């Protein structure tokens, strides 16, 4: 008689039949895939030492470089290594889908795959240099909400900051600016040591995600190993949180901790943690509104008003406390700061691509409109659609479904935002990873391939006339999404148990 095997992939135990165990063996031992991931990450870091987001000018090298040059050979080596990492991640995922990835193993994978990216030059983005510059401004007694990095004067730090952000004040919340101040105070004068220190600060957020996600996934009846595979050890997460060191790691770590605490019966503490996350980046406030919506499904009408009032008071107290404590004023909530993320129009943003395509059609048939106005109208329509969709989700939250809808709302917000960068996708992916959506192929595709929207140096991959391809593809995808019934499936919650 066959005895079912219980793997350690889920804290709640996943019962698998001998046939399932055989299938898991057919994909190869998990150690093989972990080793492939290590090779891929090392290869990317070595080949990326010349074509990545390396310090500028070219005479200021990273603490190690490999003489692979910056030509076709370096790019081929880089993307070949990326394919190897993707293969390793997919192989681990095959085990995770069968409940064969334990939380302990996920920690090991994170350490092995993240270490090369932690030690190597930044890849896919130059935002780390902007963070260091803002910290240097604060350490010199200047207000990063008023003064741009250009005030630091010529030097390798300013040269390494992306040109579009050299004359732009900080768009981030006061908690993160305070963190950059601390980072600048302890990192010394070497640009390499500064980058490493700022990466280490972001690892605090990664650690919070590693702790919170398994608890949240188990509570929702889902696999914790699969959640970590999507949200923390995926290529998009490694590139965004470790190599690029984006502050989204801190925001998500605090927000997921808040959602985990809040759904565990300590709503007030959950709201406070999400509010704290919002003082890094405002989209974390989504955690607050969906925690409140979740609680409102469990109480009567008077209880709902009390919950809303208490949550609002806690959020305001946290935001005021952090803002006053940082001592940098309220500029971060002003219209200028809130407008900063929308100023750069890149074709990897769906609305910009569609708007530019629509302009091209209108211009071709002789309609007297400008490209800027056309894109602005499309962005406005997208904004209305995003707000309408999120409000619908809030008012249709069912008991136990708030976390999944929060993740969907974040994805909707990002896709229909005026500017999209790949690391923004991690907001929704990380939340959805703990829900029933963790088995979605679309979610896995985002987690695995999302960063390919930009090149190794951080330059958007779509430029020039690319909108003639991306525009109609996006419009076609929208029509299919609405007419195929997928939109209804996403909103109501698919069943991946089959």
Image (tube, rainbow, N blue to C red):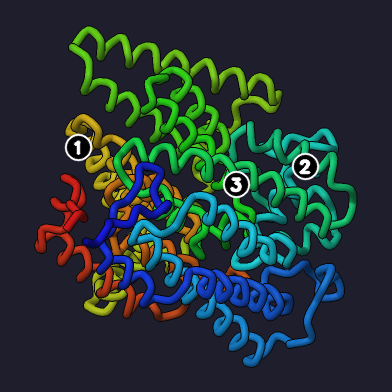
Residue position for label 2? 183
Q: Nearer the viewer, residue 75 or 155?
A: 75
According to the picture, the residue beneath numbered tag 1 turns out to be 392
Q: Quadrant of residue 128?
A: bottom right
User: Do the CB atoms of the residues marked 3 and 2 lie less than 8 Å apart?
Assistant: no
Q: Which residue is mark 3?
A: 247
The x and y percentages for residue 102 are 47, 53
Residue 170, image quadrant:
top right
Q: Residue at x 69, y 27 (%)?
A: 328
On the image, the x and y values in percent for residue 242 come to 63, 57
Give the CA distance from mark 1 to mark 2. Answer: 41 Å
Q: Quadrant of the N terminus?
A: bottom left
Between marks 1 and 2 in the image, the one whose residue lies nearer the viewer: 2
Q: Quadrant of the C terminus?
A: bottom left
- Vertical order, 250 against 495 (above or below): above
Task: Tell me residue 313's x, y (percent).
Answer: 44, 13
Say whether disc 1 or disc 2 marks the residue closer to the N-terminus. Answer: 2
- The residue nearer to you, when weighing 205 against 377, is 205
Mark earlier in primary sequence (3, 2): 2
Residue furthest toward the bottom? 73
Q: Does 107 sit left or right of 74 as displayed?
A: left
């Amino acid at each position: 008689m066959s005895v079912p095997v219980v793997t350690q992939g889920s804290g709640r135990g996943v019962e698998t039949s001998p046939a399932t165990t055989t299938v898991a063996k057919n994909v190869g031992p998990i150690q093989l895939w972990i080793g492939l991931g290590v090779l891929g990450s090392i290869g990317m870091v070595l080949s990326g030492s010349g074509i990545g987001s390396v310090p500028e000018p070219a005479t200021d090298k990273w603490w190690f470089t490999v003489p692979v040059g910056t030509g076709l050979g370096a790019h081929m080596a880089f993307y070949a290594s990326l394919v190897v990492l993707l293969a390793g991640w997919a192989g681990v995922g095959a085990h995770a889908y069968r409940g064969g990835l334990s939380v302990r193993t996920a920690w090991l994978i994170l350490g092995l795959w993240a270490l090369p990216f932690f030690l190597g030059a930044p890849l896919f983005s130059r935002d780390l240099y902007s963070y260091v510059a803002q910290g240097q401004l604060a350490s010199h007694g200047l207000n990063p909400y008023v003064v741009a990095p250009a005030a630091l004067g010529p030097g390798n730090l300013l040269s390494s900051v992306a040109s579009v952000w050299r004359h732009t004040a900080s768009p981030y919340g006061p908690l993160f600016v305070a963190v950059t101040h601390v980072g600048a105070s302890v990192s010394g004068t070497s640009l390499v040591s500064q980058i490493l220190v700022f990466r280490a600060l972001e690892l605090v957020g990664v650690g919070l995600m590693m702790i919170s996600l398994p608890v949240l996934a188990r509570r929702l009846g889902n696999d914790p190993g699969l959640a970590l595979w999507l949200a923390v050890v995926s290529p998009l997460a490694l590139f965004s949180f470790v190599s690029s060191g984006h502050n989204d790691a801190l925001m998500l770590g605090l927000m997921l901790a808040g959602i985990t605490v809040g759904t565990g019966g300590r709503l007030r503490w959950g709201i406070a943690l999400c509010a704290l996350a919002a003082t890094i980046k405002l989209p974390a406030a989504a955690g607050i509104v969906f925690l409140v919506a979740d609680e409102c499904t469990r109480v009567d009408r008077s209880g709902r008003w009390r919950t809303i009032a208490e949550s609002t008071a806690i959020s305001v107290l946290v935001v005021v406390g952090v803002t006053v404590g940082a001592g940098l004023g309220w500029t971060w909530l002003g219209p200028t700061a809130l407008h900063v993320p929308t100023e750069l129009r890149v074709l990897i943003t769906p609305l910009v691509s569609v708007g530019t395509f629509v302009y091209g059609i209108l211009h071709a048939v002789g309609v007297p409109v400008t490209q800027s106005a056309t894109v602005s109208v499309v962005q406005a329509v997208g904004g209305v659609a995003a707000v309408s969709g999120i409000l619908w989700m809030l008012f249709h939250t069912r008991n136990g479904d708030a976390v999944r809808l929060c993740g969907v709302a974040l994805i909707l917000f990002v896709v229909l935002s005026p500017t999209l960068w790949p690391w923004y996708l991690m907001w929704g992916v990380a939340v959805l990873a703990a829900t029933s959506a963790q088995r979605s192929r679309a979610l896995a595709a985002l987690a695995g391939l999302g960063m390919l929207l930009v090149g190794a140096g951080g330059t958007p991959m779509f430029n020039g006339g690319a909108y003639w391809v991306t525009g109609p593809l996006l419009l076609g995808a929208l029509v299919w999404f609405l007419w195929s019934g997928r939109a209804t499936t996403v909103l109501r919650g698919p069943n991946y148990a089959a």
